[in-house]
Image (cartoon, helix red, strand yellow):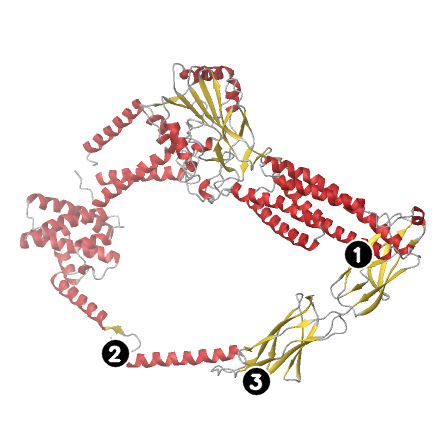
Amino acid sequence: MTRIKPYTWLTIALLLISTLVLITHLSTTGEEFSRYNVGWTGTSDFFSTLDRHTTTDIASPSDLAGYKNATLVLIAPDHAFTPAEGTLYRDFVTRGNTLLLADDFGSGNTLLQSMSSSIVIRQGTLSSVDRAYNNASIVVVYPAGDTRFFPAGSPIVLDTAATLTGGVALLKTSAFSWVEEIPGNNTRSVKVLGTYTVMAQEKIGNGSVYVLSDPSIFINGMKDPGSPYANHFFLGEIAHTPGQVLIDTFGSRVARVYGIGEFIQSVRSNNEYRFMIAALLMAGIVIAWKRRLI
Amino acid sequence: MRFLTLSALLLLLVCIALGGLLAFATNPLLYSVEKDQAGSVFHKNPEVLRQLAINSTTDIAPLMQDIIDDQQSVAVNIRSRDLEAARRDLSEYTVRYGSLKITVVNLDMNDAEIQSFMASLQDQGDILEALRTNTSAFDALKKIAERVGSQNNTDIQFSVAGQEAALKDTIQTLNSRYLGSHENIMNVSKKLGLDTGKYQLTLAEVQKLVAEIQASQLVPTDPASLQESRITLLAEPEEAGYRDSVQIFGLVTPAGGTKEIQLHLDGSTLMTLSTDPKGYYSTIFTVERIRSGLHTVSAATGNLTPAERILNVTKTASVTTLTAKPGLTNASVTGAFCNGTVMANHPVRNVPLTILFDGQGILNTTTDGEGKYKVFLPLSPGRHTLKAQFSSDDYPLFPSQSNEVALQIPSPPISFIPSGNPFLAYGAVALVLLGAGTAIIVFVRRRKPALHTGTGLQKEPVEAVRIREELELIIREAEREFPPAGSAQEAALYKTINSLLGRYEACLRAHGLSEAARQTYLTLAGRIASRLGLPAYRTLTPREMSETCTDESYAGIFDRFVRIYEKIRYGESTSEQDRKGFEVELQEADSKVGGDKD
C-alpha cells in the first residue's frame, strides 16, 4: 500500500467535510414558508418542534379520510382548491376534526368558499399603531375571546397580515389600525381606521375551522419576537395540540423545494433510496481499498 | 501510478466541490440579514427592524384626548372675553398639535383616516384663533359705537355699521367651518374610543358666542345711505403708545367689486389695501418707528374724497439695562463684554443704543429683534465706569439710561508667542522644535558605539558577518571531502566512471552502502542545486533539499529517493531489501534529474 502523507489525509478530511456542508447546503431552499428553508422566510424551526410520532403529512385531500380528533394545519396555500377537494376538507372537519388555515394573500379563500365557510380573507395589508417593530405592517393583535391556542390577554405579533370577515373573532387589532385597500398601486389608497379581525373560528358539523390571516407567524423570523408577545406559546400549542397533527403538503407551500434540494429531499424521505446510496458508498470504499487507493 | 490516481481523485473531488459552490455563487442560500432585507408581499424581515419597547396606542390616544379636550378652555375664555388667557391656551393647543403630528408621522399614520382628523384639528385651531381676533375686533367696534353714539356723526356710524356687518359675516363663516370639522372629529374620536364629552361642550360654547355676537346691534343702519358714493375711515384706538395695535377700517359705497384703497400716514403712503365685494376694508397698524404727537391717517380710492382720522401717538417710558464683565479678544485686546436690554412694556426692537465709558468715550450699537444687545468694548487695563443710554426721537419712547457699572480691567497675560500673524508664530516654533530634534538625533548617533565592520559606505553588521563566515567554513569543509557537481575532482571521476550508478557501485565496494548512498545523494543534490541556483545547498538537510524542488517535475521521485536514503544513511539500514529499493529509486532519480539536466 502506498504510504499517504499526513497533509493528504488532511486534505481528504477537509474535502469530506466540505462535501457534507455542501450537501446540507444544497438540501435547503429559499422558497418562502418551506420547511426546508432555514432562512428567516422558512418554517424549518416550527417543523423541527413537531413530534414525528404524532405528525403526518397529507399529500392529497383523499388522505384525510378516516381521521378523528385530528388537527390539520394548512399554512400559506397557493393551490386553488376545487369544489370536490373542498368537500373532502369539509367532510374531514364535519367528522369532529379541526382545520387551522393560515393564509393572507394566497388561495385560502378558494378553500373556504369550497367548504361553504362564512369566513373570508380580505386582500388588504393591515397596519397598526400597535406594532412590535418600527414597521406599521408588523402589527400587535389581542385575543378577543377564549381559545385553545393562546393564553387570554397575551398579545401576538403578526407580519404583514390580511384581515378577516365572518366567523367568531378570536384575535383582533386595536382601534388604531387600518387596511390599505389598494397596496402597491399608484392610486391613492383609502385607509380606514378601525378594529379588524385577524383570527376567526367557525363550527362546521362536529369540528371547527380556525382561520388566521397571517401565515408568517410560522416563519423562522417571527418565531419569538420576545416578551410580552405569545407567539412562541401559540406555535407550541399548535405543535403539541392534543391528537394527531396533520400537515397539509397538498395545497401548502411548506413542502416546496426545487432543484438539487428536491432530489436530496426525495432521497432523504425514501428509505429504499437511502439504502441504495449507502450500498454504493460502501462498494466504492471496498473498491478503493482493493486497489490500494486508500 | 498510485500517487497519480490519488491526485486525480482529489482533483475530481475539489472540482465537484468548487462546481457545486460556483453554481450557487450568484444566488447563495447562505443568508445574511443585510442581503435579505426586502422580504416579500407576505412579510417583512423583523431581523433588520428596530424593536419597539412601547405600546403605541398608549402614546397616541392620550395625546388625541388632550388636544380635543383643550379646545373647551379656549372657547370658554373667548366667550368670557379673557382673550389673553385664550391666546395662551391656543399656544398650548398648537404645541400639543405639533407633538401629535410628529407622533402620527413617526407611526406612519399620516396616510390613514387620521390625516383628515389631523386636518380638522388644525382647522379648528385656526378657527378658534380667528374667532379670538374677530371677537376682539367686535369688542373694539362696540367701544367706538358706545363712544360716538351720542355724537350723531353719520360718517362714523356709517363705518361702524359696515364694519359690524363685515365682522358678523366673518364670524358666521367661522362658525360654519367649525361645525363641519366638528362632525369629522366626532366620528373619528368615537371610532377610536375617545371621550368626547368636553369636546361637545366646546361646540356649545362656540355656538353661544356666535349667537351673542349675531344678536348684538351696535348702530342702526339706514339702507339708503349705502348707495351714496363715499369712503369712510375709522381708527381704534385713536390714541396709542409704542407697539400698540391700531385697527384701521372703513367702507366704500356703493358696494360692487373690489376697490384699491391707498392708506397714507402724514401724506406718505403707508400701505395699499383692497375692499371685499361689500366694500369693507380693514388692517392693523402697529405703532413702532413713528414720532410721538398727532398724525393724520387718510384713506383714498378713485376720485372719492379721502377720509381722514387723527391718530395721537403718545410717548412710553423705556428702561435700559447693562451688565458688563472684563474679557479679552484676539488673546490680547483687553476690554469689557457688555450686554443688556431696552424695554418699553415690550422689547424695543432694532433701535440705536450708546455705551458711554469713563464719561467721555462712546460706542454705538443696536438692539436685536428681542430688544437685546451684546457688544465688546475695548478698554485699557485699569478701572472704568460704563453706562448704556437709549435716546431716539424717531420712536415714541422717552430716553433712558442704565445704572453706572464700575469695572476693573486686568492686564493681558504674558504670551510667549509673538503677536501678529499666528501662522508665522506657530511656524517659527515648529522650526525651532524641528532643529532641536535634528540636533538631538545627530548627537545620539555620534555617541553610538561602532556596531559595523568594514569600511566604506556599505557596512555589514557584525552578527551577519559572523553567520556568513560560519556558513562559508561549513561549505569549504564539505567540498574538501566531497567534490561539488561540476568540480575538477568530479570531472576526474566522470572520466574514469561516466555513470552515477557505476560510481555508486564502485563506492559501495570500497566504502559500503551508507557512504555510497551519501555520495550519490550529494551528486543528485548538486545537480538540483546547479539547476535551481542554490550555492549553499550543502547546508540543507536532505528533506530541506527535497522541499526546495517541490515545484519541479522530478519532485516526487527525488522525495522518494530522499526517504529511502534517510533510512540507509540515518537509520543505518543495511538490509538487502532497502539496498535494492535504494538502487531502484536511484536509477529513476538519476534518469529523471540527470536526464533533464543533460
- Name the kind of residue labelled 3 in the image: Arg
Asked if marks 3 and 1 touch (Cβ < 8 Å), the reply is no
Asked if marks 3 and 2 touch (Cβ < 8 Å), the reply is no
**Side of A148 where B11 appears, left or right:** left
Q: How far apart are marks 2 and 1 (CA)?
A: 98 Å
Query: What label does residue B283 carry, if any?
Result: 1
**Element at label 1:** strand
Q: How far apart are marks 3 and 1 (CA)?
A: 53 Å
**Element at label 2:** loop
Q: How far apart are marks 3 and 2 (CA)?
A: 68 Å
Marks 3 and 1, the one that precedes in the sequence: 1
Q: Mark 2 points at which residue?
A: B450
Tell me residue B580's x, y (percent).
10, 44
- Residue B327's place in the image compared with B42, above or below, is below
Marks 3 and 2: which is nearer the front? 3
- Name the kind of residue labelled 2 in the image: Ala
Q: Mark 2 lies on which chain?
A: B
Q: Mark 3 lies on which chain?
A: B
- Residue A259's place in the image compared with B267, above or below, is above
Marks 2 and 1, the one that precedes in the sequence: 1
**Side of B133 where A190 appears, left or right:** left
Q: Mark 1 lies on which chain?
A: B
Marks 3 and 2, the one that precedes in the sequence: 3
**Side of B340 where B266 appears, left or right:** right
Can marks 3 and 1 be said to lie on one chain?
yes
Q: Mark 3 points at which residue?
A: B383
Tell me residue B445's x, y (percent).
31, 79
Tell me residue B267's x, y (percent).
86, 66
